[in-house]
Image (cartoon, rainbow, N blue to C red):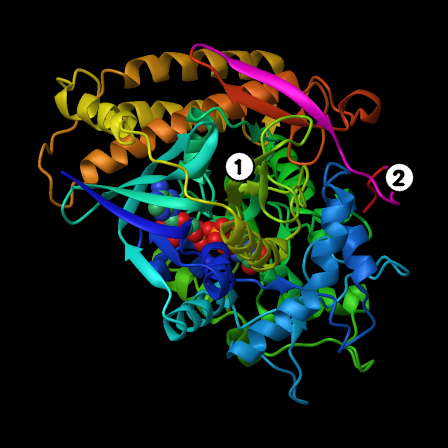
């Protein structure tokens, strides 16, 4: 049985981007939010370090500096008009969140406190600047709770634990989505004038990741299957500091507060790779430096991890060596109490999960798959662009990690994603409501649920000759080995072959649970299909890009090649192949330069 609903705007996803979009769309249009998770379980709630904005209320800072740092951090692949827009909007959205009730950490004077973060600098001195606004080390949790409360206050309609599996199109226009209700297993069709995808990222393609189990790339896979391209998928960020083997994130805020990375010989090795900003270089640079150290045998105990040390003695020792001062000019020195107050959650994680007390001893860390720079192509208003001529698809929007605006280019700076989700979530919400005002509902096709039913029926009827767990394991292994921090032609060609083979084997995957109620077995297996599509597009786009830029580091093409490759990739998923095309990067006033740290 199929249930039918009608809303002017449907938002898929209830993380920071989806909730911000909902707040704004619901002001002008009949809006509903669909989420496969209960909203406050969205991954935004896991964000620790902070949200970037050049408030300039503690020391000098400017939106222009934030813009330039982001352009440079993106390794010149970010679209400069969109970056300028985001950084200019940043202070206003931070104050907007504050006025909604977000409990930011504060200075003694009562101002919003800020900490240092990788890649954020005073452009005159090149030194790190205080730009990351935070609520201890649970900034994302606070953003999510605050936005959810606001949505409840404004009586936004939520369909919780509704898993969207398809986008319904009618005569080339958006007509709605199809979702499975987890509790009943029933299909629902949501007829809509506008659909906003805000489904988050896809880090579960890799073995060691900081990402939630739900980060399976659903939004990108659903739109790919409907003929919409995915942009810049070869760029996936590895965060330098995940807990060894577990991948759980240790925020960059640890280094912002003065923590340092140490190798087997007790050396603070980042001073060799980035003499100016050292441990606060961009994430791609730090992750690669760690790999080189480990490859050269300087991992701790000869293994693939390093130490991250935030004990007060170490912080104070290096603060003295660096001559670090507070904004009032006094030397930067910390007590254990201060560290505990600023980083309570990560200290707790380490004590709980690995029995290490970061107040007394260093944490074992390794790079962890963290953030998707690529995704559904949009402009700065969240409008989805379906080709290299920037043609819009009326009624379709995307915002947050699932979208590629592109403000992060080849490498995202820390704190810029929480900023991205509120700035572009808001824009997408406004635009979708505006569209709904003039547009009419497209008629729903009779076969609206057919594609979804086919996919689920196949999984339910297959004999189970292939096991999802095996395919998932093999996908993660090959993507980590060959489409990870360092890449080569040979490795990536093998990865492409392997993923193709896994996609074939996936056709024979079955599920054990054939029931209707809370069939997570079925939906998790569907998610694996989404991950495989995303993995193939990622590997193919990476293989084609013959240069190194940001997070895409090729050993066989170690240099950035602006003459040929300063362009965005667009990948279409065709029946038996991936088609790649390219579109130019939007440049305003920043000429590409060599990145120096
Ligand atoms: C551990 C960690 C720490 C981080 N720390 C920071 C930080 O300090 N600063 C920073 O700027 N960034 C940080 N990031 C990145 C940032 O948190 C995320 O990129 C951002 O929160 C993503 O928000 P979103 O709204 O796009 O997605 P999410 O918050 O993940 O929300 C996705 C939503 O989509 C829903 N959904 C997904 N698929 C479907 C489907 N098929 N059907 C229905 N619903 C669906 C989910 O239920 C969920 O509600 C961090 C990320 C991680 C993993």
Nearest the viewer among 374 and 278 is: 374
Residue matched to label 1? 302
Q: Does the residue tagged 2 have its C-beta within 8 Å of any atom of ligand 1?
A: no
Describe residue 228's horizontal placement relative to residue 552 as left or right.
Answer: left
Dot 1 crowding, Cα within 10 Å, few <14, some 14–19, many 20+: some
Residue matched to label 2? 591
Above or below 571: residue 94: below
CA–CA distance between discs 2 and 1? 42 Å
Q: Is residue 580 magenta?
A: yes
Above or below 505: residue 417: below
Question: Can you tell which mark lies on residue 171?
Answer: none
Q: Is residue 121 visible?
A: no
Q: Quadrant of residue 239?
A: top right
Dot 2 crowding, Cα within 10 Å, few <14, some 14–19, many 20+: few
Q: What x and y, as percent, mark residue 530?
A: 38, 30
Q: Quadrant of residue 596?
A: top right
Nearest the viewer among 86 and 441 is: 441
Identify the residue at image location x=62%, y=51%. Answer: 262
Q: Main secondary structure of the magenta part?
A: loop
> Which region shows up in magenta?
576-593
Identify the residue at image location x=77%, y=45%. Answer: 80
């Amino acid at each position: 049985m199929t249930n039918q609903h009608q809303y002017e705007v449907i938002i898929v996803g209830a993380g920071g981007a989806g909730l911000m979009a909902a707040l704004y769309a619901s002001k002008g249009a009949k809006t509903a939010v669909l989420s496969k998770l209960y909203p406050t379980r969205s991954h935004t709630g896991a964000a620790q370090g902070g949200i970037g904005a050049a408030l300039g209320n503690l020391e000098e800072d400017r939106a222009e500096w934030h813009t330039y740092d982001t352009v440079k951090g993106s390794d010149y692949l970010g679209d400069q008009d969109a970056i300028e827009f985001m950084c200019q909007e940043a202070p206003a959205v931070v104050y907007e969140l504050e006025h909604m009730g977000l409990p930011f950490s504060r200075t003694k004077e009562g101002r919003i406190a800020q900490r240092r973060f990788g890649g954020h600098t005073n452009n005159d001195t090149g030194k790190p600047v205080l730009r990351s606004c935070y609520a201890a080390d649970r900034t994302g949790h606070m953003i999510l709770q605050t936005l959810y409360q606001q949505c409840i206050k404004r009586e936004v309609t939520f369909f919780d634990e509704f898993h969207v599996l398809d986008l319904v199109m009618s005569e080339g226009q958006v007509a709605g989505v199809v979702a499975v209700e987890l509790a009943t297993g029933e299909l629902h069709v949501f007829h809509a004038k506008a659909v906003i995808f805000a489904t988050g990222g896809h880090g579960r393609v890799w073995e060691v990741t900081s990402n939630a189990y739900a980060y399976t790339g659903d939004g990108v896979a659903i739109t790919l299957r409907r003929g919409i391209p995915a942009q810049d998928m070869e760029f996936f960020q590895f965060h330098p500091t995940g807990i060894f083997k577990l991948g759980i994130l240790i925020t960059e805020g640890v280094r912002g507060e003065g923590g340092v990375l140490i190798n087997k010989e007790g050396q603070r090795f980042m001073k060799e790779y980035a003499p100016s900003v050292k441990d606060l270089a961009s994430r791609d640079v730090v992750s690669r430096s760690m790999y080189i150290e480990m490859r050269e045998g300087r991992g701790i105990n000869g293994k693939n991890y390093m130490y991250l040390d935030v004990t007060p003695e170490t912080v104070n020792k290096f603060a003295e060596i660096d001559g670090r001062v507070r904004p009032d000019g006094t030397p930067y020195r910390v007590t254990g109490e201060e560290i505990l107050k600023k980083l309570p959650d990560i200290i707790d994680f380490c004590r709980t999960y690995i029995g290490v007390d970061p107040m007394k001893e260093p944490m074992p860390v390794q790079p962890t798959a963290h953030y998707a720079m690529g995704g559904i192509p949009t402009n700065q208003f969240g409008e989805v662009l379906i080709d290299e001529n920037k043609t819009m698809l009326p009624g379709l929007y995307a915002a947050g990690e699932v979208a590629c605006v592109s403000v992060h280019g080849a490498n995202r700076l820390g704190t810029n994603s929480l900023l991205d989700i509120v700035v572009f979530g808001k824009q997408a919400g406004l635009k979708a409501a505006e569209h709904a005002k003039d547009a009419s509902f497209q008629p729903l096709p009779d076969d609206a649920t057919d594609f979804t039913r086919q996919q689920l029926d196949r999984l339910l009827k297959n004999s189970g000759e292939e096991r999802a767990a095996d395919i998932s394991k093999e996908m993660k292994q090959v993507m980590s080995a060959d489409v990870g921090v360092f890449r080569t032609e040979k490795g990536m060609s093998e990865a492409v072959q392997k993923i193709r083979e896994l996609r074939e084997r996936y056709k024979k995957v079955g599920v054990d649970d054939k029931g209707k109620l809370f069939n997570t077995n079925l939906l998790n297996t569907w998610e694996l299909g989404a991950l495989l599509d995303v993995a193939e597009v990622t590997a193919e786009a990476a293989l084609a890009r013959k240069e190194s830029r940001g997070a895409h580091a090729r050993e066989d093409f170690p240099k950035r090649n602006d003459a040929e490759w300063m362009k965005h990739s667009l990948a279409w998923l065709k029946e038996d192949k991936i088609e790649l095309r390219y579109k130019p990067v939007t440049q305003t006033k920043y000429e590409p330069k060599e990145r120096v740290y």
